Image: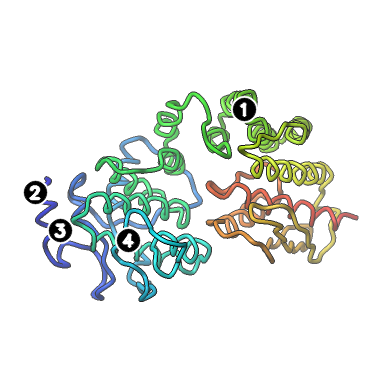
Amino acid sequence: MRRAARLCLSLDRKCVFGSGTNHGIILIGIALLLTAGQVFGDDSDAQTVVTRTRDEVEALIKDQGGTSPQWWDSVELTYPETLDMSWPLRAEGPWNAGKNVGQYIWDVVNPNPGRWKEGVKLVHHLMILQKDDSAKVCRSMNTLGRMFHDLLEDWPRAAFWWRMSAQRGGAYDPLGLAHCYWKLGNKSMAVEILSQYRQDYTRHGAIIRLWAEMGEFDKAMQLAEEKARFGAADVGYLAAGDICRLRGDSKRALAYYEKVLASATTNSREADSKHNKERAKANIEAVKCFDSLDLSRIGDGLYNAGSTAYAGPLYVEVAVKSKRIESVRVTRHKERQFYSALTDTPKRIIERQSVVGIDAVSGATMTSEAIINATAKALASGMK
């Protein structure tokens, strides 16, 4: 198997998938290290979660993971001529998004949805250019996993590339992989990963939030309380409040948010603590709106409001017609790493016709939260 992979990597475009253009390629030789007989598959549905067996999930990851997405041939690979295509493992010198690939992805690709697919093609291209450097190949695989997960919500391909990196000894995101399994329809595969963590070690309570997203509220609350007791009261109580809010228990949610405001600030996390308290205040304001909202009492029109997001205030415009939420549009924000929250969260609000019980977009919790809060405030302003 390894010999076949090396031979394929040494050949021309017969060993890769893509269009007839120089840049329309997707690396498959490396994929042969772990999988064989790749079959082209349709893109996954990013929004719908169905129940699948382990074998079905494995087949989906195998069949779609190493194949080119349907959009591949329609997206041109472009990047600055100044970009250092050797992509060193450690960038040197001052921050320069025009030179350093990682910084270019962070500053230019991530904040611009129109460049997400172009960014994926760039990383694929770099993986091929650096095919003889194992560490750089793993770095590209890990980056592809993150981009397919955070940006495109393509769960089979995200899982495929993270697993490829892991099995070659490279870095990957285990929580992201667990989330992929959940979104692909197999909760037990996600639980196998999450169960390895007896505590939530993450900065913003990502483990807690994933347990809650999967409906394991008791487990999520247990971890949130533990995090609050052991040195991160603001994070733990904020997560606990969000869980109660997701379950529709506004009274308990408000109580936990008040605990965030009363929690001590630690010097090592002063900026985070300050921001978490700002979020708690915004959540208290929004939750109080939740209980009084009644679409039947809101007249037709456009309603505007703002709330606290990750990088600053975020504003929305909500259109109501015939007692229904017709649209939710983010009109102004300062977010840079919002991923798909700006489109996904409004869509979920419209589908649910409510701001209650909506899961935040994974990886962009604060942005989603701000959209939900601002929408609640906007609707409340239209109550008669």
- Of the numbered discs 4 and 1, the one sitting upstream in the chain is 4
Query: How far apart are labels 1 and 3 at the CA level?
Result: 49 Å
For badge 1, the amino acid type reads Gly
Confirm whether residue 31 shows in the render: yes
Q: Nearer the viewer, residue 230 or 74?
A: 230
Q: Which mark is residue 9?
A: 3
Q: Report whether 123 appears left or right of 108.
A: left
Question: What residue is rendered at 81% in x and 46% in y?
Answer: 289
Q: Dividing the picture into quarters, in which one does residue 130 lie?
A: bottom left
- Of the numbered discs 2 and 3, the one sitting upstream in the chain is 2
Query: How far apart are labels 4 and 3 at the CA level?
Result: 19 Å
For badge 4, the amino acid type reads Trp
Q: Which mark is residue 151?
A: none
Asked if labels 3 and 4 touch by Cβ distance under 8 angstroms, the answer is no
Instruction: Where is residue 370? Give x, y as percent.
Output: 68, 52
Question: What residue is rendered at 70% in x and 43% in y?
Answer: 274
Which label lies toward us, 1 or 2? 1
**Dot 3 alpha-carbon crowd within 10 angstroms: few under 14, some 14 to 19, many 20 or more:** many
Asked if labels 4 and 2 touch by Cβ distance under 8 angstroms, the answer is no
Q: Which mark is residue 3?
A: 2
Q: Residue furthest front?
A: 93
Instruction: Where is residue 54? Give x, y as percent.
Output: 34, 35
- Of the numbered discs 4 and 3, the one sitting upstream in the chain is 3
From the image, tell me which residue sits under label 4. 87
